[in-house]
Image: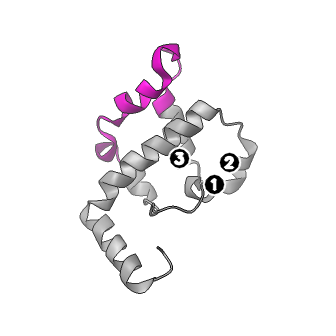
């Protein structure tokens, strides 16, 4: 759903199970928490808020949420980092191959 809110770019949809797998998210929390800088409150996890936003299941849920710009930025960065890991995985490479071979309108 996060991809639908962004302008069309070169990111493929990452499967939800890949996004929810903790192994694929290793070491990304510290990168995302740096976005908040010194202002980041210890009781507020920017990483968890960004991940929750990415995993929000429906467009209706997203429309009903008030999303702070910092969380939106963190979610976009987190999705980009996970996408980079996905696209070099065997499943991601297969998906890219299929899309580029059979769908000439992707790019």
Decide whether the magenta segment is chiefly helix, strand or loop: helix
The dot on residue 5 is: 1
Residue matched to label 2 = 62
Q: Residue at x 48, y 33 (%)?
A: 48
Disc 3 and disc 1 in contact, CB within 8 angstroms: no
Residue 26 found in image quarter? top left
| Image quarter of the N terminus | bottom right
Question: Where residue 11 sits in the image (x, y, percent)?
Answer: 45, 60
Q: Is residue 18 left or right of residue 50?
A: left
Question: Where residue 55 sits in the image (x, y, percent)?
Answer: 52, 48
The dot on residue 54 is: 3
Nearer-the-camera pick, 32 or 16: 32
Camera-side mark, 2 or 1: 1
Q: Residue at x 41, y 77 (%)?
A: 99
Disc 2 and disc 1 in contact, CB within 8 angstroms: yes
Read off the magenta span.
20-47
Q: Residue at x 54, y 33 (%)?
A: 49
Please tell me how crowded label 3 is: few (under 14), some (14-19), or many (20+) other residues with Cα within 10 Å: many
As drawn, 42 above or below 85: above
Residue 63: say if magenta. no
Q: Secondary structure at mark 2?
A: helix
Q: Secondary structure at mark 1?
A: helix
């Amino acid at each position: 759903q996060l991809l639908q809110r962004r302008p069309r770019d070169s990111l493929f949809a990452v499967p939800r199970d890949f996004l929810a797998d903790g192994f694929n998210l290793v070491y990304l929390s510290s990168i995302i928490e740096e976005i908040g800088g010194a202002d980041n409150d210890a009781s507020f996890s920017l990483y968890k808020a960004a991940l929750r936003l990415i995993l929000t299941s429906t467009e209706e849920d997203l429309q009903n949420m008030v999303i702070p710009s910092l969380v939106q930025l963190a979610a976009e960065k987190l999705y980009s980092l996970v996408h980079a890991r996905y696209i070099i995985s065997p499943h991601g490479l297969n998906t890219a191959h299929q899309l580029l071979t059979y769908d000439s309108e992707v790019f």
